[in-house]
Image (spheres, helix red, strand yellow):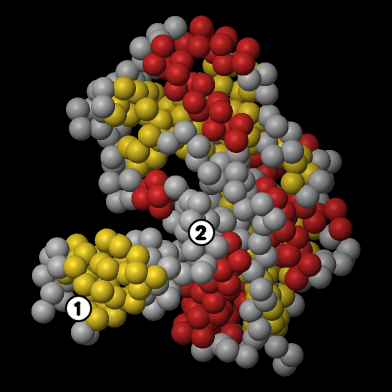
Amino acid sequence: MFKKNDVIEVEVVDLTHQGQGVAKVDGFVFFIENALPGEKISMRVLKLKKNIGYGKVEDYLSKSPHRNENVDAAYLRTGIADFGHLAYSEQLKFKRKQVADNLYKTAGISDVEVAETLGMEEPYAYRNKAQVPVRRVNGQLETGFFRKNSHDLMPIEDFYIQDKEIDKLILFVRDLLRRFDIKPYDEKEQTGLIRNLVVRRGHYSGQIMLVFVTTRPKVFRIEQMIEKIVAEFPAVKSIIQNINDKNTNAIFGSEFRTLYGSDTIEDTMLGNRYAISAQSFYQVNTVMAEKLYQTAIDFSDLTENDIVVDAYSGIGTIGLSFAKSVKAVYGVEVIEQAVEDAKKNAELNGITNAHYVADSAENAMANWSKQGIQPDVIIVDPPRKGLTESFIKASAAMQPRKITYVSCNPATMARDIKLYEELGYKLEKVQPVDLFPQTHHVECVVLLQRSKE
């Protein structure tokens, strides 16, 4: 029987969906960081539960041909790039398999082909947004990322998957904060001023927004800092302060103040312009978001007479990209600020046939039904928890020809598809899209078509 700190030889046989190696020994299943299928390792037992355990690699006895040796272990330890050790072509295969496995296990579907995952030509330095904690490490203010499952900051200078300009700005601001002797936040003591830096950069426009998240309103010599930042980075069009004085994991508090420039930056997606505020939801990988949305548009096969419902519409990015080629778009989003943004974005692009309401998706569907609005296509893009049963029933009751489902979680997507199939919709197409290279996340677009009565 094993005990903690035993060192044993094991072969890694599988990967979990979060990128841990899986080994099976004497009825135990072990999960091991930074271990790939096919590798033989000498493993130290870290923790044991009833019939599962956690181990760490002491030594590689043989390595996988698919191992990426060039990745810094810090990215694996922080979870910034929890698949960074796996060759990119294999990451894409793994994501496709995840989607297929979920469809089979949850919905019993194995006869619909899951297309090969759409990947990126350059699968790094893609993130257009960074949220970076500021803490004291060994007596010095540092920016970096928390070690997995902890609040210990690991100083990091090159974030690997972030836009390089964003990385440069963060380092510049870090050095300024040190120079001006600004105190970093201390979670345990609840002291210090600066908690986080949040940076957004338009992929096409290059415009940058910097948000200082502070514990209190007054920041000593902030004007001098702003002057230096703008002189060094003329692309910074917006500097905002957010005040968060609560002991919480949430990044933003409720109060935002614009310190320099405008409240928003602009970027384009699929040819439309968007105003993006500090708290707007805007996909972090613009290049792949365009592919994701284009796939959803292609699957929907829209015509100029179509009425389309865009559920979970955010700031309008999906609906507005095809609004000009359909009769009308009806969007619903529960976050009021996002609905305001969607209306502004429609205006910004001269779109007059897109109508947005702030409501739960179920309520909006019921109201539109009462008004006699009959959608030809419903596009859904829900959060990780997927759709509610009441939404699925309400959307099927409107009897659209097609339901195009954009998912960021294959497990909840498969569960929802099963219910749609029971309500008379059949799964026709499945396309995984890699919006988050080097990480375990996978997005997917599926097409459900109403069965002919």
Q: Residue at x 81, y 70 (%)?
A: 301
Quarter holding residue 327: bottom right
Residue at x 50% of width, y 37% of height: 158
Report the quarter where the C terminus lies: bottom right
Q: Is residue 378 left or right of residue 11?
A: right
Element type where label 1 sits in the image = loop
Whole-percent x, y for residue 59 in the image: 30, 62
Q: Quadrant of residue 22?
A: bottom left
Estimate how packed mark 2 is, as few (under 14), some (14 to 19) or many (20 or more) residues with alpha carbons within 10 Å: some
Look at the image and tell me in which quarter the N terminus lies.
bottom left
**Label 2 or label 1, whichever comes before in sequence order:** 1
Viewer-side residue, 297 vs 182: 182
Q: Is residue 119 visible?
A: yes
- Find the residue positioned furthest to the bottom: 453
Q: Residue 247 in the image: state x and y as whole percent.
A: 27, 34
- Calculate the distance from the C-alpha at mark 2 to the C-alpha at mark 1: 31 Å
Q: Residue at x 47, y 11 (%)?
A: 222
Q: Quadrant of residue 184?
A: top left
Foreground mark, 2 or 1, reads 2
Disc marking residue 68: 2
Q: Which mark is residue 51?
A: 1
Counting from the top left corner in percent of width and height, residue 165 is at 61, 31
Residue at coordinates 40% horizontally, 50% vertically from top-left? 73
Q: Answer left or right for 240 relative to 118.
A: left
Residue type (three-letter) at the residue carrying disc 1: Asn
Is 132 above or below relative to 319?
above
Q: Nearer the viewer, residue 198 or 89?
A: 89
